Image (cartoon, rainbow, N blue to C red):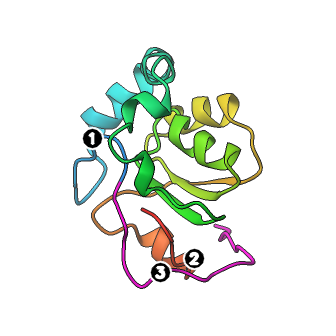
């Protein structure tokens, strides 16, 4: 396994806000859950992509960082949110545990500012192994 290294590792000592999808904590990958996400990856991605970032997160847009930041997107799904942050100049670590969802997302969003990790809550072991700190989670 290779680890992601970002040249910039300055971070705030606190989490300003948590954005993401409906993330369920689980100790190990649930076969049924991941099978469903993998089986429905194309249709789920189409649904996620059909609603703009600004619409989904309208209540918190004023809380997002103005300057270039390192963002952790847990449960990145189709990559819509990661792509929005990347398009606004941020570096993003996008965590998506369902392999087919991640594959679809990588195809949809090819920005080099997005780095993908196969990881999951509650441990986020791969994320912690990077040694990175994040400005926004």
Looking at the image, which residue is at 43% across and 51% down? Answer: 62
- Closer to the eye: label 2 or 3: 3
Mark closest to the chain's N terminus, 2 or 1: 1
Report which residue position mark 3 lands on: 12
Report the predominant secondary structure element of the magenta stretch: loop
Percent across and percent down for residue 85 are 60, 48
Q: In the rendered view of the protein, which quadrant contains the C terminus?
A: bottom left
Q: Quadrant of residue 5?
A: bottom right
Q: Which residue is mark 2?
A: 130
In the picture of the structure, the residue carrying the numbered disc 1 is 22
Q: Position of residue 45 (x, y in %)?
A: 49, 23
Closer to the chain start, of discs 2 and 3, is 3
Number of marks: 3
Question: Image quadrant for the N terminus?
Answer: bottom right
Q: Is residue 94 magenta?
A: no
Tell me what residue is drawn at x 74 percent, y 38 percent: 110
Q: Are the residues tagged 3 and 1 within 8 Å (C-beta)?
A: no
């Amino acid at each position: 396994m290779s680890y992601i290294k970002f040249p910039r590792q300055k971070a705030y000592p606190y989490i300003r806000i948590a954005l993401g999808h409906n993330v369920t904590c689980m100790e190990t990958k649930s076969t049924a859950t991941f099978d469903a996400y993998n089986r429905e990856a194309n249709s789920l991605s189409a649904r996620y992509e059909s609603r703009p970032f600004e619409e989904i997160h309208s209540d918190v847009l004023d809380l997002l960082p103005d300057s270039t930041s390192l963002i952790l997107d847990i449960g990145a799904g189709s990559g819509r949110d990661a792509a929005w942050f990347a398009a606004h100049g941020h570096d993003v670590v996008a965590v998506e545990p369902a392999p087919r969802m991640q594959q679809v997302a990588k195809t949809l969003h090819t920005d080099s500012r997005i780095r993908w990790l196969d990881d999951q809550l509650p441990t986020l072991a791969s994320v912690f192994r990077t040694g990175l700190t994040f400005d926004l989670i």
